[in-house]
């Protein structure tokens, strides 16, 4: 059972990870939907293996699990057995301001949609910040208005959904603007408060178009 599920990821073995936000946990299922195990919950908090409204989850090739522990302003990283490996950030907001989406590239770099700071932070496996994109809310290329979703395409491009911009931006690995699409509305190619983005192995992009109560699938260009 879920209460406001806000993020989902699938690992190389087909296991499904759900950020069950208001239950303050990550629930894990096998490829058939059978319950597997849980991280966090039932009690919320700021201790190890505790969350407050986690919004995003990602899994890397080594089956490490990255949780955007949103109201604790941190990323917690777990191994394949569910043991805590490392924590980046803290409730004081020294590194993140409402981290919402999280993704991991093939090179192991971790991309965090730092929502209230209007930026994407890129970290290495030691938690060191190697790049920051955006940081000033706006509608220009490379600017974000409340980014809440981030995904890495098979070509290494980075896709970012932003709630207040009503669009998805695509950037290269260096953070350079490549293209964008979307504007506020219900028609084709429009969004209303998009709340997440995912990219398939074939390059097709799916966007959680939250206030339009739909998922929009965009064909690969």
Image (spheres, helix red, strand yellow):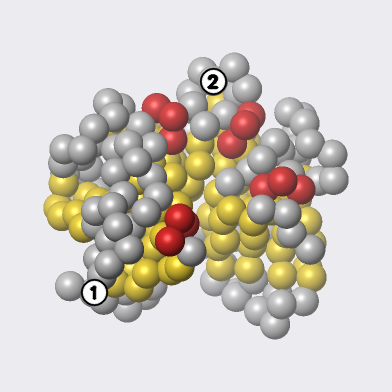
Q: Judge whether 215 appears above or below 119 on screen.
A: below
Front-lying residue, 185 or 34? 185
Q: Where is residue 189 in the image (x, y as percent from the top left)?
A: 25, 65
Q: Where is residue 166 in the image (x, y as percent from the top left)?
A: 31, 49
Quarter of the picture containing the N terminus is bottom right
* 54 is higher (above) or lower (below) than 207: above
Q: Nearer the viewer, residue 186 or 165?
A: 186
For the point 21% across and 38% down, the residue is 139
Q: Where is residue 161 in the image (x, y as percent from the top left)?
A: 35, 51
Earlier sequence position, callout 1 versus callout 2:
2
The image quadrant that residue 40 belongs to is: top right
Which residue is labeled 1 in the image? 220
Residue at mark 1 to residue at mark 2: CA–CA distance: 37 Å
> Which residue sits at x=29%, y=29%?
137
Dividing the picture into quadrants, the one containing residue 88 is top right
Residue count near mark 1 (Cα–Cα under 10 Å), binned few <14, some 14–19, many ≥20: few
Looking at the image, residue 31 sits to the left or right of residue 37; the answer is left
Residue carrying label 2: 93
Judging from the image, what secondary structure is the residue with disc 2 in?
loop
């Amino acid at each position: 059972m879920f209460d406001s599920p806000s993020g989902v990821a699938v690992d190389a073995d087909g296991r499904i990870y759900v950020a069950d936000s208001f239950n303050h946990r990550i629930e894990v299922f096998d490829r058939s939907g059978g319950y597997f195990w849980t991280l966090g919950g039932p009690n919320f908090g700021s201790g190890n293996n505790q969350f407050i409204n986690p919004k995003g989850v990602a899994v890397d090739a080594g089956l490490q699990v990255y949780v955007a522990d949103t109201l604790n302003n941190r990323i917690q990283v777990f191994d394949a057995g569910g043991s805590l490996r490392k924590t980046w950030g803290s409730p004081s907001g020294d590194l993140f301001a409402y981290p919402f989406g999280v993704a991991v590239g093939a090179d192991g770099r971790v991309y965090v949609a730092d929502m209230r700071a209007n930026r994407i932070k890129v970290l290495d496996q030691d938690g060191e910040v190697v790049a920051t994109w955006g940081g000033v809310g706006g509608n220009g290329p490379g600017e974000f208005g409340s980014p809440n979703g981030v995904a890495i395409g098979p070509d290494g491009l980075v896709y970012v959904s932003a709630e207040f911009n009503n669009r998805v931006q695509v950037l290269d690995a260096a953070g350079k603007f490549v293209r964008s699409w979307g504007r506020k509305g219900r028609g084709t190619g429009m969004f209303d408060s998009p709340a997440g983005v995912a990219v398939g192995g074939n390059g097709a992009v799916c966007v959680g178009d939250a206030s339009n109560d739909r998922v929009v699938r965009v064909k690969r260009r």
